[in-house]
Image (tube, grey):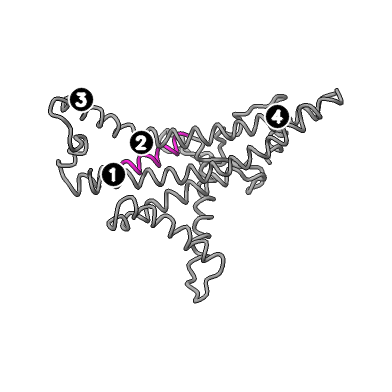
Amino acid sequence: MRIYRVVNVAGESGKIDPMHQFQIEQLAPFNIGGYDVSFTNSSLFMMIVLGALWLFMWGGMKRDLVPGRWQMAVEGVTGFVNNMVTSSVGPEGKKYVPLVFSLFMFILMANFMGMMPIGIVPGVHPFTVTSHLTVTAVLAVLSFGTVLVVGFWRHGLHFFSLFVPHGTPWWLLWLIPLIELFSFLIRPFSLALRLFVAMTAGHVLMKVLAGFVINGLNAQAAWVPLVVSIPSFILMIGITLLELLVCAIQAYVFALLTSLYINDAVNLH
């Protein structure tokens, strides 16, 4: 649980702020040409996520004759992503497995890191980097940019035929391409917003429930903890388990949609 963060915030400001957990904090101020490029808690946790991902992959690449649990875990995740991409794109999808795997694992570990109940670094609260639109937008642009590059590289200007589905009646050629183009251009926004909203909403709900627990325990009336704190704590356990599931589902959805978008670029229709 993350109740300790509520206690810290309440003790500092006198009230519980559910949005405090998303605040960017400077750890090492730095300025280049008048631009603030300080090292922040978001930067720190992105580096921690990359380090954890490297450690996970390094420990599972021993290629022992009898694979251990660690190696089996790495092979299982790799095989899962490989099957997802090849089933979506086809045999040519294998060349895009590293990209989709990197996106999937980064989002998955970033989501789980933000759910940790205690801080990894002393004095720095756990931070969910995927709860910021700037991070999810960069991941979405990376996915969408890959689709554009692959599409124009393979098909040239014929890539625009993607916006004219097969069997489109001639009298709808003025409308269907516009709808398809709008649907295509909205993809990076939907990718970024879906991940951002899911992580933000879940963490805010957990913080609010934690506030009910703390405020109920601090209440003077003896009946308040029984009516408020205990039910809120039980509900918080369930929400925490649900949020862990959402963390995995959001990483899977992002990777799956990226695979489907790459399929459009490779195979068009």
Residue 145, position in %: x, y?
30, 42
Between the C-alphas of marks 1 and 3, the distance is 23 Å
- Residue to which mark 1 is pinned: 147
For the C terminus, the quadrant is top left
Q: Horizontal placement of 132 versus 190: left or right?
A: right
Give the mark nearer the N terminus: 3 vs 2.
Answer: 3
Q: What residue appears at the point 77 percent right and 33 percent down from the top-left corner?
A: 230
Badge 2 local density, few (<14 within 10 Å), some, or many (20+)? Answer: many
Marks 4 and 1 in Cβ contact (< 8 Å): no
- Which stretch appears magenta? 133-145
Which residue has dot 3 on it? 175
Q: Report which quarter residue 68 is drawn in.
A: bottom right
Regarding mark 4 in the picture, which secondary structure is present there? helix
For the residue marked with disc 2, what is the amino acid?
A: Pro
Examine the rendered structure and indicate whether residue 257 appears above or below residue 56. above
Q: Image quarter for residue 136?
A: top left
Please indicate whether residue 217 sits to the left or right of residue 58 in the image: right
Q: Amino acid at mark 3?
A: Leu
Q: Residue furthest left?
A: 170
Real-space Cα separation, disc 3 to disc 2, in angstroms: 22 Å
N-terminal of the two: label 4 or label 1? 1
* Mark 4 residue type: Gly
Marks 4/2: CA–CA distance = 35 Å
> Mark 1 is on which residue type?
Val
- What is the number of the mark on residue 87? none
Q: Give the mark, 4 or 3, whose residue is nearer the N terminus.
A: 3
* Relative vertical location of residue 113 with respect to residue 196 in this rendering, above or below: below
Give the CA distance from mark 4 to mark 1: 44 Å
Q: Nearer the viewer, residue 16 or 11?
A: 16
